[in-house]
Image (cartoon, grey):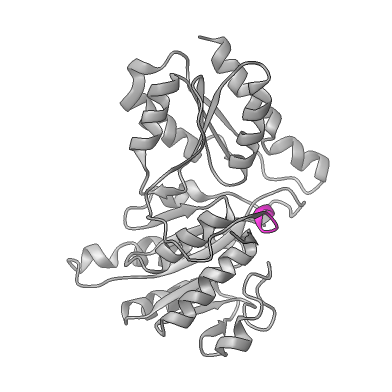
Amino acid sequence: MPELTYREAVRDALSRALREDETVFLMGEDIAEMGGSMAVTQGLLDEFGPKRIRNTPISEMAIVGSGIGAAIQGMRPVVEIMYEDFLTLSMEQLVNQAAKHRTMSGGQVKVPLTIRTQGGAGWSPGAQHAQQLESWFVHVPGLKVVFASTPEDVRGLLWSAIYDDNPVVFFEHRTLYPLKGEVPDELEPIPLGKARVHREGTDVTVVATGRLVHDALTAAEQAEKDGISVEVVDPRTLLPLDEETIVASVKKTNRCVTAHEAVVRGGFGAELAAVIQHAAFDWLDAPIERVGSKFAPLPFAPVMEQYVIPQVEDVLAAIRRTVARA
């Protein structure tokens, strides 16, 4: 299988959808000539032209609102919000409009809208350009939420998001764009709501998202030197959530660590812990450990940024704590 970067895998999914389906078009700030702030859409303007690769004004509410209107009229728009922090400016359209139309119309109105956005720390962007806000959107009925961690997964999940008849918020992590991985020549859609077990183990389950999937795999390798067998599960789709795979893993290992880059308080790990506590309480041999960022705005200074966000060492420490408690 050929190797693609995470960035190339996203671009491949977009370009294939644009070639195969005239109802698909892209819109967002500087996505045409510039190719987007992260260079994901570079080259698409030359192939598909300005009617299908559309630059927009700097108004996230207008961008998302226009996407909703186009989706209701039968198109399949893929909207890019430059930084996920800026989703806060479009919350009314996302939460009160996109997420509600299908239910309020009795199923007569579909909103096949995909909202791509990126965020994440690790490159000193400061407090307003790297927040991880995925748990905000998991709280909204009517939305679907995806967070892919590998090139293969990001391509297959993005394709499924584009062809879902519901609005999908599709998160990408800034530091994963250069990541390379094997991706099949044939695009294989990945169903929304199906987790991936990246590594099997017997002593503790780590359920991780985004960048922390890779940190969890590194921590698992280090834990193995201590004789600890770690299973690493990536939900991939946060809403709908593959509870069955996650709970089955915890019932096998009897211990669990959740890991994400968002702050711990109110983060997605709290929802995972609640699901596991409800469905697998009798199988737990130790309290569930949660790993995430400290409860502080992200500092600009690199040394402070690294202090606030979780590292491999934090995941490894949580693994060791939960095993030691047994």
Q: What residue is rendered at 47% in x and 60% in y?
A: 156
Query: In the rendered view, would you say 262 is above or below 48?
Result: above
| Rendered view: 277 above or below 178 | above
**Residue lying at the far left of the rendered structure:** 106
Snapshot quadrant of residue 279: top left
Seen at 68% across and 39% down, the residue is 309
Of residue 85 and residue 38, the one placed in the foreground of this image is: 38
Q: Is residue 297 above or below residue 104?
A: above
Residue 237 in the magenta stretch? The answer is no
Q: Position of residue 157 (x, y in %)?
A: 46, 58
Q: Where in the figure is residue 78, as x and y percent of width and height? A: 47, 73
Looking at the rendered structure, the number of numbered marks drawn on it comes to: 0
From the viewer's side, name the closer residue of 125 and 226. Answer: 226
Residue 120, image x and y in percent?
65, 51
Q: Main secondary structure of the magenta part?
A: loop
Residue pictured at 49% horizontal, 21% vertical: 202
* Nearest to the observer: residue 40 or residue 142: 40
Q: Quadrant of residue 59?
A: bottom right
The N terminus: image quadrant:
bottom right
**In-image side of 228 versus 95 (left or right):** right
Can residue 176 be found in the magenta stretch? yes
Horizontal arrangement in the rendering, residue 62 relative to residue 128 (left or right): left
In magenta, the rendered stretch is: 175-179
Q: Is residue 145 visible?
A: yes
Query: In this orientation, does residue 266 appear?
Result: no
Residue drawn at (41%, 63%), measured in percent from left and top? 161
* Drawn side of residue 128 relative to residue 124, left or right: left
Residue 310: quadrant of the picture:
top right
Q: Position of residue 47 (x, y in %)?
A: 59, 87
Instruction: Spot the residue most to the front.
Output: 1
